[in-house]
Amino acid sequence: MFDKVLIANRGEIALRIHRACREMGIHTVAVHSTADENAMHVRLADESVCIGPAPSADSYLNIPNIVSAAMITGAEAIHPGYGFLSENAYFAEIVEAHGIAFIGPSPQHIQTMGDKVAAKKTMIEAGVPVVPGSEGAVGSPEDARQTAESIGYPVLIKASGGGGGKGMKVAETAETLAEQINLARREAKANFGDESVYLEKYLANPRHIELQIVADEQGGVVHLGERDCSLQRKHQKVLEEAPSPALNAAERERLGEIGCTAIRRLGYRNAGTLEFLYENGEFYFIEMNTRLQVEHPVSEAISGIDIVREQIRIAAGAPLSFRQKDIDFQGHAIECRINAEDPATFAPWPGRIVEYHPPGGLGVRVDSGLYAGYSVPPYYDSMIAKLIVHGATRNECLMRLRRALEEFVITGVRTTIPLHQELTAQSDFINGRYDIRWLEDYVAGQAAV
Ligand code: ADP
């Protein structure tokens, strides 16, 4: 096992990784920008190295500085967390070239799955159902028009290099296709440096259901159940739950089969997530995330598996310590992403935390680097805490979630806690009847009142 791991991230996920390392007796190295000198993960880590100024491009995305920090401190492995360099195949390659273990999949798998066109092609070959769409990136406007015609309108234009919902546009009719493609190309170029786009059938009312996988170097593949991430705003997840209230036992089993078979065929290692849209009893693959995800704790809650611990063990060459039949799913879990934002307008709200009192009690977990007196910097993602609640049934989980939200005190900045309180009181949510459009419609309805 490793003696020392460098954590190439910040915020709650850096702390989450630190916790797993500590419990495994592994020393930690935190890296941080000048804006994060006083961050909780920096305070708790055994060592810390400043890797640059506040903007991410100069610090958390600064490959030479991060690799140098690992070399200087003698870290044997790097955990990239999520976001930042976690899905950068070049980073994984450079890390390995320096004799440091990358806690994640091989650079080749990151590369393939990071190109959504290649990912879809690979999944089709592995027998996974995908959303009907163009075969690869679209070429000339005429080619695009013909493809869209054969898929049927409305069509969704997606960036090959996409992520975070960027570079995604809907063309309702043939008249708007060319214009929407141009808009998508421009956004894709600006965000990912690659203007290639592809077309997909725009599903009307799907749910977003994803499967958590862990796989070792020895060919062991286990899924940790599905997560329902349909509550989204601007294609960004707001609340996630496991299991999905929409699936029956047979569908759940089918999803697990599809996912594990594909992962085995790919020869993929470490943790990963297969994302699907689910409509009328069918699953359609949309993308694979080759990293730890923000919402991983709901899967940990129902499976009892520490996913970060497994990631570290796998990277050290150890086989999974369990098989599929050992996983005994228990109860229901829900995660709320709490952002430093105005709960009505979603405007970011960085600033100094005055009071901080997280909820507690049975079945309540809070992953956050916050403390009273901490200043939320304006440079990074606005998520400041995750509240994860586990209960024996969905109803118990929901009641527990509501009381936990009520207890949660964060003052000094605005947060989305009131939004979660509102959402969890809606009858559609209580009844598990929501799809990927539900939240947008709800927010639009509230704004109109
Ligand atoms: P990104 O990597 O940018 O997040 P995804 O492919 O994961 O993009 O899609 C993000 C979200 O966009 C999905 O969760 C879903 O809400 C919506 N979406 C993606 N593909 C489709 C589709 N074909 N039809 C309808 N909605 C879609």
Image: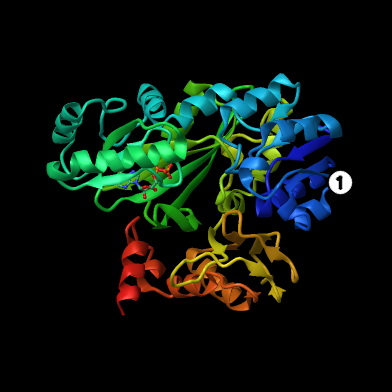
How many marks the image carries: the answer is 1
Q: Which residue is mark 1?
A: 46
Percent coordinates x, y for residue 221 in the rendering: 56, 30
Percent coordinates x, y for residue 156 in the rendering: 27, 42
Q: Quadrant of the C terminus?
A: bottom left
Q: Is mark 1 within 8 Å of ligand 1?
A: no
- Label 1 element class: loop
- Quadrant in the picture for residue 181: top left
- Quadrant in the picture for residue 98: top right
Percent coordinates x, y for residue 121 in the rendering: 36, 24
Q: Quadrant of the N terminus?
A: top right
Question: Which residue is more in the foreground, 135 or 428?
Answer: 135
Percent coordinates x, y for residue 120 in the rendering: 37, 29
Q: Is residue 163 left or right of residue 61?
A: left
| Residue beneath the point at 51% across and 26% down | 111
Is residue 88 among what the camera can see?
yes
Badge 1: residue crowd in 10 Å (few <14, some 14–19, many ≥20) = some
| Residue beneath the point at 61% across and 59% down | 378
Amino acid type, label 1: Asp
Q: Is residue 406 left or right of residue 287?
A: right
What colour scheme governs how the chains and residues are painted in the rendered image of this protein? rainbow
Q: Quadrant of ligand 1?
A: top left
Is residue 162 among what the camera can see?
no
Q: Is residue 406 above or below residue 339?
A: below
- Quadrant in the picture for residue 435: bottom left
